Image (cartoon, rainbow, N blue to C red):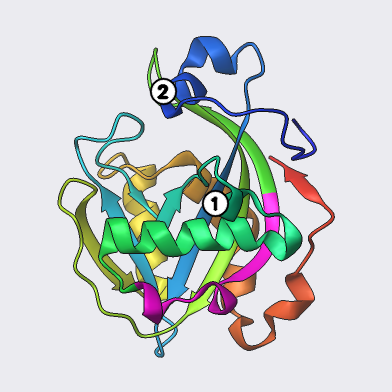
């Protein structure tokens, strides 16, 4: 529900149909922001085969926990962090031992809604997860069209291109960038001041 209490499970398809979203269907998700030792952020461009927001640039990895005991465990968001480890491997080919859940930092949650097209959309409670690590990449081309590490200045250039319509970015990435990202990025050594597991930011 809107306070992130689990009240059921549904298929990925049903959760992303606008007709269900308009009736209030909401699901749990996560967004990973992975930075290397140079404090550059790993971005991906979503595959053109994706149902929602194909070809859009976005943060390192975005997906959903599965409805199984390991990924539903809520203590310190360990289930969501396990799901993030699984999807970093599936999408980017990052070996699971390189990103153990204890090295995935849970900052806070946002609640947002966005349409991809007339049929598909998003309505999520999105867990924001940060990782600082040099990792091995072997992306799955079915998931990812391209990827790159960017500095803050390079991301600002990317945002200008998105504003002019030259490229597209995902709505959740746009929301997080505009509201939070640069402040967090400036304080990668002091992220604890931004940890808030009580509040859900309504965007």
Q: Residue at the spot x=63%, y=36% of the render?
A: 112
Q: Spatial distance from mark 1 to mark 2, Cα to Cα? A: 17 Å
Where on the picture, by quarter, is residue 3?
Answer: top right
Q: Which numbered circle lies on residue 30?
A: 1
Q: Residue at the spot x=66%, y=28% of the render?
A: 8
Query: Residue 67 appears at what percent x and percent y?
Result: 55, 40
Which circle's residue, 1 or 2, is located before the other in the chain? 2
The residue singled out by tag 2 in the image is: 13
Report the span colored magenta: 96-109
Depicted 8 relative to depicted 5: above or below:
above
Q: Which residue, as the protein is rendered here, is positioned at the far front?
A: 69
Q: Residue at the spot x=38%, y=81% of the render?
A: 98
Residue 108 on the magenta span = yes
Query: Which secondary structure, mark 2?
Result: helix
Res. 87 in view: yes
Residue 196 on the magenta span = no
Quarter in which the C terminus is drawn: top right
Count of picture labels: 2
Q: Which numbered circle lies on residue 189?
A: none
- In the shown orientation, is residue 174 left or right of residue 153? right
Q: Nearer the viewer, mark 1 or mark 2?
A: 2
* Foreground residue among 54 and 23: 23
Depicted 110 relative to depicted 140: above or below:
above
Q: Are marks 1 and 2 in contact (CB under 8 Å)?
A: no
């Amino acid at each position: 529900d809107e306070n992130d209490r689990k009240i059921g499970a549904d298929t990925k398809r049903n959760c992303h149909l606008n007709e269900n979203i308009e009736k209030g269907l909401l699901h749990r998700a996560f967004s990973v922001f992975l930075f290397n030792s140079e404090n550059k952020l790993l971005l991906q461009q979503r595959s053109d085969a994706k149902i929602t927001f194909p070809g859009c640039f976005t943060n390192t990895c975005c997906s959903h926990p599965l409805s199984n005991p390991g990924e539903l465990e809520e203590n310190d968001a360990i289930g969501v962090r396990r799901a993030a480890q699984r999807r970093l491997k599936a999408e980017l080919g990052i070996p699971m031992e390189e990103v153990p859940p204890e090295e995935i930092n849970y900052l806070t949650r946002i609640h947002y809604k966005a349409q991809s097209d007339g049929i598909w959309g998003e309505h999520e409670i999105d867990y924001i997860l940060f990782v600082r690590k040099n990792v091995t990449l072997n992306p799955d081309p079915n998931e990812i069209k391209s990827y790159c590490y960017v500095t803050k200045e390079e991301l600002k250039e990317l945002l200008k291109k998105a504003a002019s319509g030259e490229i597209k970015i995902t709505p959740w990435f746009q929301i997080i960038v505009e509201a939070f990202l640069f402040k967090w990025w400036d304080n990668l050594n002091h992220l604890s001041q931004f940890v808030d597991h009580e509040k859900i930011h309504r965007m």
